[in-house]
Amino acid sequence: MSDRSQNQRDVLRSHLSFFDLVRVGGSGLKTRKLRSALSATGIMIGIAALVGVLGLSSSGSADLIKELDALGTNLLRVEAGGGFRNSPTSLPADAVFMIERITPVYEVATVSSIPGAVYRNDLISDGRTQGISIKATDLNLLATQRGSLQAGVYLDDVLAQFPAVVLGSVAAQRLEISELLTPKQIWLGNNWFRVVGILNPLPLAADLDRAALIGYGIAEDLFDYDGIAEVIYVRADPNHILDVREVMAATVNPEFPEEVQVSRTSDVLEARAATRNTFTNLFVGLGAVALLVGAIGIANVMVIAVIERRNEIGLRRALGATRFHVGAQFLIEALVLSGIGGLAGIVLGLIITAVYATFREWSILIPEYAVFGGMLGSLVIGGIAGLYPALRAANMSPTEALRTS
């Protein structure tokens, strides 16, 4: 009698392998294709947002690092700053000489502001300057800034003595000068100047992009330039840049070092990267919200599925399916649903990153943690969203489920 009871229990016991559970769980999604697709879309959007944002952030950061490597982080900007005295301050006349005595310094360039306005011609009324300033500079500026020319040539020993001007990139756009195949002249400080060159943008000196650059020789002849530098750009050995920055103020003005302001121009780019990281965190938060909405959608679909399939649950329990097998079936459905959404989201995020990075001419860089983390995150969210419906289905009484139509 005992053997017979044992045989009956063996017959009634459900035998389902893991692959059987996956197959049974996946079959439930086929009967509700549209509802399942819409639920997976929420997960897809969230994962795509996360992967895309992290990918674009990494690609942009890599491009910034590449830009900094090309421009160098060893460029210092020295200018007069506010001191304790009430009178206006300026750099000493021998500032350049004093800076060149610092051993790690190997490149120095100076810039000074010149009063006057810049116009396309002499017929334009005063006041319509378009924000273009006049700057007198030495011949080392282009090399010190690691700049390049869009057209023409830069100032040399001869051009610096004559009314020749080099335009910054923004200044050239505002003056509507894009090429120098034909001679171009502008009305600068009530004098005609020949445009000999146009610069490409200078990331480490944005103010020079909006300037018209002339030589010191012509500045002394036409504008009574006093020879005092307003801004000094300094290149120093990268291994000693912090030490040079530390002693720069006291070297330039030993009597009033507090009146000298020393800054590293690459800090502007790094600040821009920090600002971009703030926006990255914002969009990551929005992606997390989208994932939360997707998780709620999956939970809603699975709860409705349990209600709609009570008869199926009751029949399976009556035929010997255990609580574990019934619960696992619905949990696997949720995992499959979120897994499909996560996989589609990763692919979409990769495509978005590749397209935008290519458009911006960035290097395409996708962090591995964004891909693996996105897939793992979607499965975890699917598991959490499907846990309650799975427990509800597992705890459903067979007689109650079969009695409900």
Image (cartoon, rainbow, N blue to C red):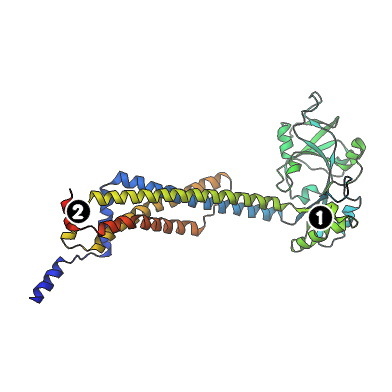
Say few, some or many: other residues with alpha carbon within 10 Å of mark 1 (under 14 / 14 to 19 / 20 or more): some
Residue at screen point 74% across, 46% down? 205
Assess disc 2: are there few (<14), some (14-19) or many (≥20) residues with their C-alpha within 10 Å of its C-alpha.
Answer: some
Q: CA distance from mark 2 to mark 1?
A: 82 Å
Relative placement, left or right, of 340 versus 253 is left
Q: Position of residue 303 (x, y in %)?
A: 30, 51
* Res 132 → quadrant: top right
Q: Secondary structure at mark 2?
A: helix
Q: Secondary structure at mark 1?
A: strand
The type of residue carrying mark 2 is Glu
Residue 304 is situated, as x and y percent measured from the top left of the image, at 28, 48
Q: Is residue 269 above or below residue 237?
A: above
Q: Is residue 103 above or below residue 59?
A: below
Q: Earlier in the sequence, mark 2 or mark 1?
A: 1
Query: On the picture, is 211 further left or further right than 402?
Result: right
Q: Is residue 323 visible?
A: yes
- Residue 33 vs residue 239, the one in the foreground: 33
Tag 1 residue: 107
Q: Is residue 379 left or right of residue 330?
A: right
Q: Residue furthest bottom?
A: 2
Inspect the image, locate mark 1, and give the three-letter code of the amino acid beneath it: Glu
- Looking at the image, which is closer to me, 261 or 109? 261
Q: What residue would you read off at disc 2?
A: 312
Question: Which label sits on residue 122?
Answer: none
Q: Quadrant of residue 100?
A: bottom right
- Pinpoint residue 123: horizontal percent, then vertical percent: 80, 23
Residue at the (77%, 47%) spot, across then down = 142
Give the tally of numbered discs.
2
Q: Is residue 315 visible?
A: no
Q: Quadrant of the N terminus?
A: bottom left
Image side of residue 334 versus residue 245, left or right = left
Location of residue 298 in the rendering, given as x and y in whole percent from the top left corner: 35, 50
